């Protein structure tokens, strides 16, 4: 894991990690129906 050198005037106060789901959404231009495709492999 890499440790970064922060400038003295700029210090992070909080860090958040979360999973981003691998999904794709399609919307029909005619009927406006929505189809959601969920794939494996959240990152």
Image: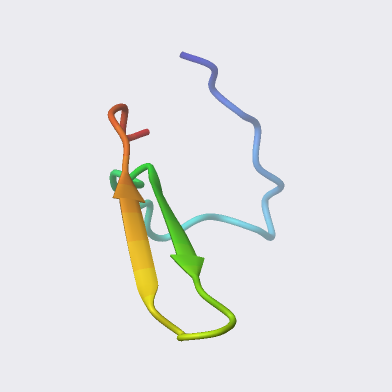
Q: Position of residue 32 (x, y in %)?
A: 46, 85
Q: Position of residue 14 (x, y in %)?
A: 37, 58
Residue 16 in view (yes/no): yes
The tally of labels here is 0
Q: Residue furthest front?
A: 30
In this rendering, the answer to whether 34 lies above or below 6 is below
Q: Position of residue 41 (x, y in %)?
A: 31, 27
What residue do we see at 28% from left, 29% from top?
40
Q: Nearer the viewer, residue 26 or 22?
A: 26
What residue do we see at 37% from left, 42% from top?
22
Image-quadrant location for residue 4: top right
| Left or right of residue 21, residue 3 in this image | right
Q: Nearer the viewer, residue 3 or 35?
A: 35
Residue 17 in view (yes/no): no
Q: Position of residue 39 (x, y in %)?
A: 32, 36
In this rendering, the answer to whether 8 lies above or below 32 is above
In this rendering, the answer to whether 20 lies above or below 14 is above
In this rendering, the answer to whether 17 lies above or below 40 is below
């Amino acid at each position: 894991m890499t440790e970064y050198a922060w400038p003295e005037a700029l210090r992070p106060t909080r860090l958040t990690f979360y999973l981003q789901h691998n999904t794709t959404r399609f919307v029909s231009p005619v009927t406006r129906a929505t189809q959601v495709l969920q794939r494996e492999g959240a990152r």
